[in-house]
Amino acid sequence: MNDHTQVERRFISVRNLAHEFSISPATIYRLLKAGKIKAVKIGTATRVEMKSVETYFASLPSPNPNTP
C-alpha cells in the first residue's frame, strides 16, 4: 500500500504559481520565455516545473538588510 500523504508537487499552473508567489502571470511568462524556469504544455494548459522555480529563486541574491 502506497502512502500518498506527502506527494511532491512537480508542476503548477501559471495562475496558481502567480498567486502563491504574489507575482503576475506576465512575469512568469517572461521568465519562461527567457529560459529561467521550465514548463510543459498539456493540451492548451501550461504547467510550470516547480524544481525549476526553486532553482531560479535560489539563484537570486539575498536582500541586503542594510539597504533602506
Image: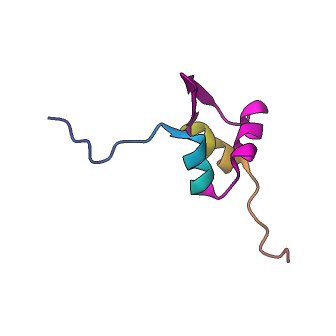
In this rendering, position of residue 49 left or right of residue 25: left
What is the residue that sits farthest to the left in this orientation? 1
Q: Residue at x 61, y 30 (%)?
A: 39
Q: Which residues are magenta?
A: 21-49
Locate the C terminus and report the quarter of the image it occupies: bottom right
Is 40 included in the stretch rendered in magenta? yes
What is the residue that sits farthest to the front in this orientation? 44
Q: Is 56 rendered above or below residue 43?
A: below
- Pick whichever, 43 or 30, lies toward us: 43
Q: Quadrant of residue 45?
A: top right
Colour style of the rendered protein structure: rainbow
In this rendering, position of residue 5 left or right of residue 51: left
Q: Residue at x 67, y 49 (%)?
A: 57
In this rendering, position of residue 23 left or right of residue 7: right
Q: Is 2 rendered above or below residue 22?
A: above
Q: Residue at x 75, y 46 (%)?
A: 27
- Pick whichever, 30 or 4, lies toward us: 30
Q: Quadrant of residue 9?
A: top left
Is 44 included in the stretch rendered in magenta? yes
- Pick whichever, 4 or 13, lies toward us: 13
